[in-house]
Image (tube, rainbow, N blue to C red):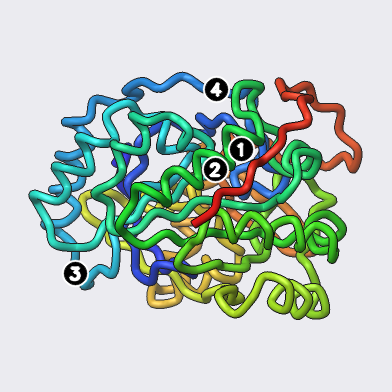
Amino acid sequence: MKCVYGPILSRRLGLSLGVDLIPFKTCNWNCVYCQLGRTIPLRNERRDYFPPEDILQELKTALSHQPHPLDWISLVGSGEPLLCASIGWVISQIKVITKVPLAVMTGGSLLYLPQVRKDILSADCVLPSLDAGSPELYRRITRPHGEITFERYIEGLAQFREEYQGRLWLKVMLIKGLNDTEKALSDIAKLLKIIRPDEVHLCLPVRPSAEPWVEAADQEDLRRAVAILGDGARLIPPVRGNFFWQHDESWADTIVGIVSRHPLEEEELMRMLSHLPSSEVQAVLTQMKASGKVQIVERCGQRFWCGASGCYPEEMNPQITVEVSHDEDKIQRRSH
């Protein structure tokens, strides 16, 4: 399938069926920790990248062949789902065809736009990112499109909280040496008082990162983060094991559809295939390699199966040209 994949076992959503609204790496951020590699080039145009009717038909087919009870349907995948101009229509139609709760996993970069906020108000849960509490760290970690200034980004999150009645779960990806210091965490804590999320999820980059120097924060850093960010912050541990269904595709095609959006550690992949005879496992791996649609990426001593289109350079100090804003944005506190 082109737009629907999984289900996968998500560390925040349980068993989740993914719906990908946009082509691979269509995003207005170039996050250093992105598991899909670098964003080249950055894109910030809202439009329908796939016919929305086709997306819905794929989802109907997937739901009709789903052997496991789902915890969530998640609009997530290859980039920034809010760049899909018809996301509001897609959400409304999903609500008609299923009672499975719907989540939108987003960076949150476009929430400063009133129409974008309106489009996702009926989602059951929205999960934006908040990896930096200052303009400088925002640029270093997120490397955004020039139109997505820090001020717009934070004001969008705060305004969405004012309008949204569902669950708002913020993700903080903790990166060693960047946003795990007392100062960086204190800056994030100040913004949490403005945005007022229902939950704060502390995550670690456990999958292949866009930049090879990215390291996960250590246990001391995590304790500091919980202490500074407050009782509402909790560590989201990695999950082991993924589930997927095999409709009318081969095992190889099914797995390629997953790793193109959700890279898998090699050990994890082998565990997923452990129910097959060893000869069939080898045939699946051979077919995947021969397809030219996967690559093996090494990060932190681990081998990951990823989509072939992902850009994972090995150089430690890459020279990257991205469009960024250098304005020192100022955030005004809101009183509630």
The type of residue carrying mark 1 is Gly
What is the crowding at mark 1: few (fewer than 14 residues within 10 Å), some, or many (at least 20)?
many
Element type at mark 2: strand
Q: Which residue is mark 2?
A: 307
Q: Secondary structure at mark 1?
A: loop
Q: Quadrant of residue 150?
A: top right
Q: Name the residue located 37 percent from the left edge and 31 percent from the top edge.
A: 114
Q: CA distance from mark 3 to mark 2?
A: 26 Å
Residue 305 visible = yes
Where does label 3 land, which residue? 67
Residue found at the very far right of the displayed protein: 317
Q: Residue type at mark 4?
A: Arg
Assess whether mark 1 and mark 2 are in contact (beta carbons under 8 angstroms): yes
Closer to viewer: mark 4 or mark 1: 4
Q: Residue at x 50, y 39 (%)?
A: 156
Q: Earlier in the sequence, mark 3 or mark 2?
A: 3
Percent x, y of residue 229: 67, 70
**Cα separation between marks 2 and 1:** 6 Å
Q: Which residue is mark 4?
A: 43
Q: Nearer the viewer, mark 4 or mark 2?
A: 4
Residue 241 percent location from the top left of the image: 47, 74
Q: Nearer the viewer, residue 7 or 119?
A: 119
The span from disc 3 to disc 4 (Cα, nearest Å) is: 37 Å
Label 4: state its secondary structure. Answer: loop
Task: Name the residue that disc number 1 marks.
Answer: 310
Task: Give the residue at x 62% y 44%.
Answer: 295
Say whether residue 333 is left or right of residue 163.
right
